Amino acid sequence: MESALNAIFEVLSFGAIIVLVVLGLGIIASMMGIFNFAHGEFVLLGAYTTYLVHGAGLPVWAGMLAAPVVVAACGFVLERLVIRRFYAAPIAAMLGTYALGLVIRESVRGLIGGLYISVPEPIVGSLIIGGVQVSRWRLAIVIITTLVMVGSYLLLTRTSFGLRVRAALENPSLARASGISTNAIYAITFTFGAALAGLAGALVVPVFSLFADLGIRFLIQGFLSVMLGGVGTFEGPVAGGAVIGVMSAALPWAVAPVLADVLVFVLAIVFVKFRPGGLIAGRRF
Amino acid sequence: MADSAVSQAYRSVPRPRRIPVIPIVELALLLILSVLPLILEDYLTIFVTRVLILALLALSFDLVWGYAGILSFGQALFFGSAGYSTALLARDLGITSIFIVLPASLVIGLFVSLALGGFLLLGRHPPTTIFVALGTLTGSYAADRLARGWYYLGGQNGIPAIPAMTAGSYAVVEGPVFYYLAFATLVLVYLLCRFLVRSQFGLALAGMREQKARIAFFGYRVQQLKAMVFSLAGAIAGLAGGLYAFHEGFVGPNMPGVVFSTQIVLYALFGGVGTLIGAVIGVIAVEIVSFWLADNYQQVWPIILGLLLLLIILFRPTGLIGLVVSERERVGTFGRPPRTLPRIAQEGGEEDQHAAP
């Protein structure tokens, strides 16, 4: 019983990590129709910022606060310089962001070498809830993910800013005709997505440690989650991320780990093949 | 979208006959490559042989993306599966005869790509480009993971020490002999592709890439056509994989993997897709520069490569080849020009495509 609960918590916390990564990816893909192949590298940048701040002698949580801001700034600059040119051409966007990701990844690799650098958890130790010992930091990840998710949802559905964003998604030309600057909306959305990626990177770095290929690990998982959930909704990518994350964490208990990883992806692709709209199809917010 | 760009470029180009650039580039490359082993030292010949094999792979990507508009991030999957299969043939069955292993690698590439392409491309819902890109990427990733975890395939270490390919009692070892084998294969495959994309079939492909719906209205089965090109390209990639396995004497789990898949995409984009020769030039250019820079600037080179690529995608979507080849020639002519039509139709097949409906 206890170990089963433990396993459930493990699965839950890994699912939360994937949801956090997918959230930014999904928002960018849904809002702007751009599949950002550099998203994994934004996660990496967040992790790297945390490491840098920690290396400068400041506490880890300071790095985690700085990461979303730094990555958002990077995202903003890149959007203005590069991504903006891709809105009309989603395929070029995929290739362009891939090249961008390559530059970021190789730069980080040049800076840290081929090392695996561990960053300590800002909240150490574990606590016992209902007879189950859970790591405090993983619990914190689950809580923060939930807060961020709810916050983003409220921002997009309950505020006038969210209304504008949705308008720009639904019908860009009508939104422009109504005096909404879709240009600015896109810039803000992309920056917001980048900030979420930075936050995800900062939160997961104590769990996975920092290495140059950290982002690749999340890239395919992230995209499959977005496809699985369905592009164009808020709930879709989140649900997809939850399913992929939970499956990736739970399946190794049932089958050999090597097969489990592959199986999750194959199942997701097969599902999307027969239901192209994804889990939550047709509903836009 | 691209349709109007094409016709606009078409109008802005002056009518008088231009000297075609692509055949000149092709001939020059053919000449240079055919004498290279006589000039180069052996270790460089071996290096160039590998580049030629990779060019074959890039050619297969150009066929699917540049002509059929299928964004395949999985060319390395076919390359790798064929490489592994031929390596197993050589290791476990002792078959190294060139007349068996090369056709075998071709057939394996064909079957794997047929299976994957059939799944991804055919069916009731026509797939989106993103779905195909992700599906091929996933296939490549899965193959990488399986190869890493499967003891029979050598796990992380791959299959080392593959014996040399044989033709009768003669062993085809790396060096000038293998070079000419790879070169001849590349030329043959290139000519085949060149014939194909300039035929009526190629016209249908180009039309499909530019505007799928219109080609569908003409009565073509668009998805079947795509699956056909996809599996043909898979066969080419498989052939390249067989050559590669025997040339390197080694196959590893990176070979079918994602990194390699995307590398090929980058090479082809760098050289310029949709011209065939662009993909070959891309591979040669990137590989030679990496070879020079690898010693001194090993860490900086991938960053530079990424930046260059970004610049090319942003400002020169036609790639390196776009610097010397006009848009009109890049689009090319298709089939045999009909004799009875007025002169203007003979100059470019593209014109009657616009006039026809």
Image (cartoon, rainbow, N blue to C red):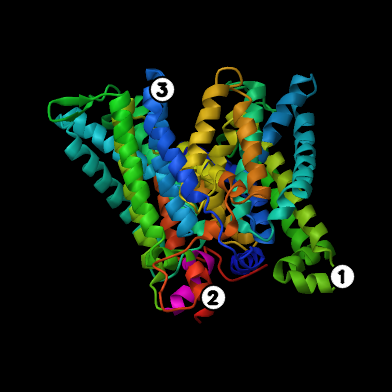
Quadrant showing the N terminus of chain A:
top left
Mark 3 secondary-structure assignment = helix
| Residue type, mark 1 in image | Gly
Pick the front one: A174 or A15: A174
Residue found at the far front of this picture:
B16
Q: Which mark is residue B354?
A: 2
Crowding at label 1, few (<14), some or many (≥20) Cα neighbours within 10 Å?
A: few
Crowding at label 2, few (<14), some or many (≥20) Cα neighbours within 10 Å?
A: few
Name the residue tied to disc 3: B39
- Residues in magenta? B207-218
Mark 1 or 2, which is nearer the eye? 2
Residue A10 to residue A166: above or below? above
What secondary structure is the magenta-colored segment mainly? helix
Mark 1 or 3, which is nearer the eye? 3
Name the residue tied to disc 1: A179
Q: Give the x, y percent position of residue A239.
A: 57, 56
Asked if marks 1 and 2 fall on the same chain, the answer is no
> Residue A253 is drawn in which quadrant?
top left
Left or right? Give the position of A108 relative to A64.
left
Q: Residue at x 35, y 50 (%)?
A: B191
Residue found at the far bottom of this picture:
B357
